[in-house]
Image: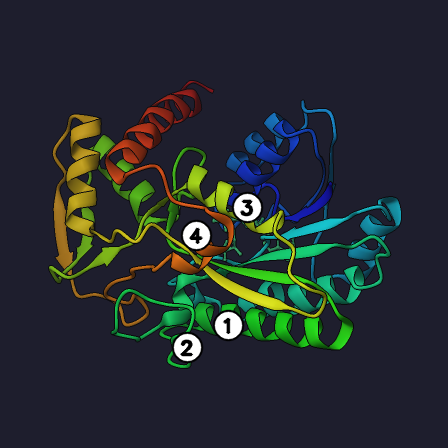
């Protein structure tokens, strides 16, 4: 396969690209390297990918058609697309909603408009999010549930991506699979996410903010499980014109208080906790059914949270120590 990976310097993109390259595939990566979080972390991830044969990187903005056309002109033999570039983060979508329109809506349409002309294109897998379940209360979340009660503008743009994929599959016969990721975590993870900010606070002895409510829980999914799910979906092509959607989560919601305890154990320090009211943009709980993707591909999550947090903390200690030294 020759795979176009958007958002390749991001958390999920870096891991997906690494696994594709390890499997002997070619990866064409695109990323704007924006400064939503540490650009250094993005370039550190990229530096590891660029040592691999079969990897080529293009710095640029997905919402610019000329940029995307330039990448495709250089690589007209792309067979698969893994679309991960996005403005991520639920809470930031209150501060800068327009950034989500540009990256998640314009970027997605520009990508589809460009790649639909590729002659050898087999399959597009793109990232959606558990956020599309919004204010739904019936658990676990299933793909057949109605998803018309978003709790944030981020969720609106992710649902718009699913609907855009559906229209493009119908109009142009594209094969597409959307994956609703449930709170991915692990080494090389995103410093804006709670598990990472908590780890930093515990390490530095500064207070962390915990949103009140015993029910606050997330279906944390270890990055290796996310990657194996993406690759399982990618290798399982739908019929032309089909646009499928699957949950990619653990089916094991963990209370956020339990996450803090696991981080305390792994870091060997107690957390200083400040309680605040939960922001309206943050849903109380997420819980994924993964029956549909398991039935289709045999995929199952394999890494329990206890093990995954241990692996994250081992990487976190080493990486943060390296930053302090440099
Ligand atoms: N990590 C999670 O828990 C999670 C959960 C649900 C959904 N998702 C989705 O999965 C995908 C990957 O998430 P992630 O955690 O790796 O996020 P990330 O922010 O680490 O990666 C996204 C990458 O896209 C790049 N990017 C943003 N806008 C761009 C643009 N206009 N042009 C080119 N590149 C651009 C960023 O520089 C970044 O490197 C995203 O679509 C996200 O919405 C992630």
Distance from mark 1 CB to nearest ligand 1 atom below 8 Å = no
Sequence-first tag of 2 and 1: 2
Q: Counting residues from the N terminus, which is met first, the one under dot 2 or under dot 3?
A: 2
Is residue 8 positioned above or below 50 on the image?
A: below
Q: Nearer the viewer, mark 2 or mark 3?
A: 3
Quadrant in the picture for residue 117: bottom right
Give the residue pinned by disc 1.
Answer: 159
Residue 33: x, y in percent?
Answer: 61, 45
Left/right placement of residue 55 relative to residue 311 reads right
Residue at position x 37%, y 80% from top?
Answer: 149
Tell me which residue sits at (33%, 37%) in the image: 303
Q: Is residue 189 visible?
A: no
Q: Earlier in the sequence, mark 2 or mark 4?
A: 2
| Nearest to viewer (mark 4 / mark 3) | 4
Residue at disc 1, secondary structure: helix
Secondary structure of the residue carrying tag 4 is helix
Q: Which mark is residue 294?
A: 4
Q: Which mark is residue 232?
A: 3
Instruction: Name the N-terminal-most of marks 4 and 3.
Output: 3
- Asked if residue 17 is positioned above or below residue 283 in the image, the reply reads above
Q: Is residue 286 above or below residue 80?
A: below
Q: Look at 41% across and 25% down and name the residue there.
A: 319
Q: Quadrant of residue 186?
A: top left
Residue carrying label 2: 147
The residue mark sitting in front, 1 or 4, is 4
Mark 4 near ligand 1 (CB under 8 Å)?
Answer: no
Q: Earlier in the sequence, mark 1 or mark 3?
A: 1
Residue 99 picture location, percent across and down? 55, 65
């Amino acid at each position: 396969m020759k795979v176009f990976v958007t958002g390749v310097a991001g958390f999920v993109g870096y891991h997906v690209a690494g696994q594709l390259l390890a499997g002997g595939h070619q990866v064409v990566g695109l990323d704007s390297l924006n400064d939503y979080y540490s650009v250094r972390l993005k370039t550190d991830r990229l530096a590891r990918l660029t040592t691999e044969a079969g990897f080529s990187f293009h710095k640029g903005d997905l919402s610019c058609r000329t940029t995307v056309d330039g990448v495709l002109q250089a690589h007209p033999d792309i067979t698969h697309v893994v679309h991960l570039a996005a403005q991520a983060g639920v809470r930031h979508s209150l501060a800068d909603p327009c950034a989500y329109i540009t990256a998640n809506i314009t970027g997605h349409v520009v990508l589809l408009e460009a790649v639909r002309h590729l002659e050898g294109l087999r399959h597009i897998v793109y990232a959606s999010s558990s956020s599309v379940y919004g204010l739904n209360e019936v658990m676990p979340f299933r793909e057949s549930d109605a998803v018309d009660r978003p709790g944030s503008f981020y969720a609106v743009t992710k649902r718009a991506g699913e609907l855009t994929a559906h229209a493009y599959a119908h109009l142009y016969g594209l094969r597409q699979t959307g994956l609703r990721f449930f709170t991915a975590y692990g080494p090389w993870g995103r410093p804006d996410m709670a598990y990472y900010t908590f780890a930093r606070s515990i390490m530095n002895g500064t207070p962390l903010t915990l949103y009140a409510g015993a029910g606050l829980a997330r279906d944390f999914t270890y990055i290796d499980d996310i990657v194996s799910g993406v690759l399982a979906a990618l290798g399982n092509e739908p019929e032309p014109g089909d646009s499928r959607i699957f949950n990619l989560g653990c089916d094991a919601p963990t209370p956020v208080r339990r996450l803090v305890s696991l981080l305390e154990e792994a870091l060997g320090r107690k957390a200083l906790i400040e309680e605040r009211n939960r922001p309206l943009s943050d849903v109380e709980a997420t819980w994924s059914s993964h029956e549909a993707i398991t039935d289709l591909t045999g995929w199952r999550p394999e890494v329990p949270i206890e093990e995954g947090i241990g692996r994250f903390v081992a990487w976190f200690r080493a990486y943060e120590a390296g930053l302090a030294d440099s």
